[in-house]
Structures are given as structure tokens and as C-alpha cells.
């Protein structure tokens, strides 16, 4: 079988002005190949620098095979089975303040917005709080809706 020979090639390079967004293009032998050129934008009369391009029109050569092994992902590590749910540990009421936990602060603010006094809301939260309770659970427990 005979190999085809390159007769001609056509290349379009589309560019745009960064100031006004006007598009312009270079075709075939207009493309700057050896050094950068200056282009004046027709939309805003700004001077633009167009970099030189290197156009490689030769066909790809076949690469020699190397002995590098293909990339492989590490094996998936299985996590241990989850522990059975345990009851949350009660918090010692005298050792902490409502301000130390984000959930308790948010719950206290919500109760204040419902008409409770700040100290009253904090004392009710202290009486029902267990480690790991969310803001919603705290509010429901204090209001007795849970």
C-alpha cells in the first residue's frame, strides 16, 4: 500500500480582544510563526500582542513500548463494622456552661426568641442535655414536643 503525501493544510486560529471581546482570526499563512505580532483591535483600537505559534504538521511517530507497568489504584481498605448504638453519656451539669457547646448556644437563642428568659432557657437546657444532642433535639426535649 502506498502512503499518502501531504498536499496542503488549513488552520484557523480564533482569538478575542480582552477589553471588548471582539473576535478575530488568523488563517493559514497569516498565522505568526517566528515572532509575536501586534494586532490592532477594530472594536476598541487597542494594541494586542499575538504570540507566535508553532504548527507541527508531521504525522505522529509510533512510540516504542516501555517496560513501565500500568498505573493501578491501591486496593480498597474495608472499614471495621460500625459499633452498636450506645446511649449518650450524661453530662455533669455543674462542670460546663451552655456557652461551651454550639448546639446549646443555638438552642438557648431559639428559646429566648420564643419568650423565655436567658437564664431560664440555659437552666432548662442543662437539665436535659446529653452528649451528642443536636440543636433540634434539645429544643424539642425542653419544650416537651419529643
Image (cartoon, rainbow, N blue to C red):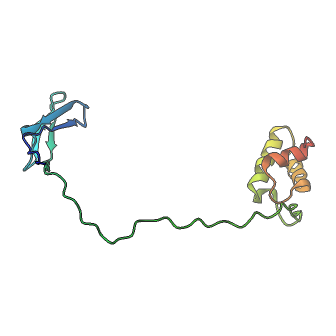
Check the image and report above or below for 144 versus 44.
below
Kindly give the residue lying farthest to the top in the view shown: 43
Depth order, front residue of 85/124: 85
Q: Is residue 25 left or right of residue 124?
A: left
Residue visible at 84% across and 37% down in the picture:
114
The mark tally for this picture is 0
Residue 90 x, y percent position in the rendering: 89, 63
- Percent from the top left, x then y, of residue 84? 83, 62
Q: Nearer the viewer, residue 42 or 122?
A: 42
Q: Nearer the viewer, residue 23 or 42?
A: 23
Quarter in which the C terminus is drawn:
top right
Residue 140's x, y, as percent? 87, 44
Q: Is residue 70 left or right of residue 84?
A: left
Q: Residue at x 15, y 43 (%)?
A: 50
Image x and y of residue 139, in percent: 84, 45
Is 114 or 52 nearer to us in this picture? 52
The residue positioned farthest toward the bottom in the image shown:
67
Q: Quadrant of residue 129?
A: bottom right
Amino acid at each position: 500500500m502506498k502512503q499518502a503525501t501531504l498536499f496542503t493544510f488549513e488552520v484557523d486560529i480564533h482569538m478575542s480582544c480582552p477589553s471588548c471581546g471582539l473576535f478575530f482570526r488568523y488563517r493559514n499563512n497569516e498565522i505568526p510563526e517566528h515572532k509575536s505580532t501586534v494586532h490592532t483591535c477594530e472594536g476598541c483600537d487597542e494594541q494586542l500582542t499575538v504570540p507566535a505559534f508553532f504548527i507541527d504538521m508531521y504525522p505522529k511517530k509510533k512510540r516504542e513500548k516501555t517496560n513501565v507497568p500500568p498505573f493501578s489504584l491501591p486496593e480498597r481498605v474495608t472499614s471495621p463494622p460500625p459499633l452498636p448504638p450506645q446511649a449518650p453519656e450524661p453530662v455533669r451539669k455543674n462542670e460546663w456552661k451552655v456557652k461551651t457547646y454550639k448546639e446549646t448556644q443555638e438552642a438557648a437563642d431559639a428559646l429566648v426568641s420564643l419568650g423565655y428568659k436567658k437564664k431560664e432557657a440555659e437552666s432548662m437546657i442543662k437539665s436535659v442535655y446529653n452528649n451528642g444532642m443536636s440543636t433540634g433535639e434539645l429544643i424539642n426535649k425542653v419544650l416537651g414536643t419529643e
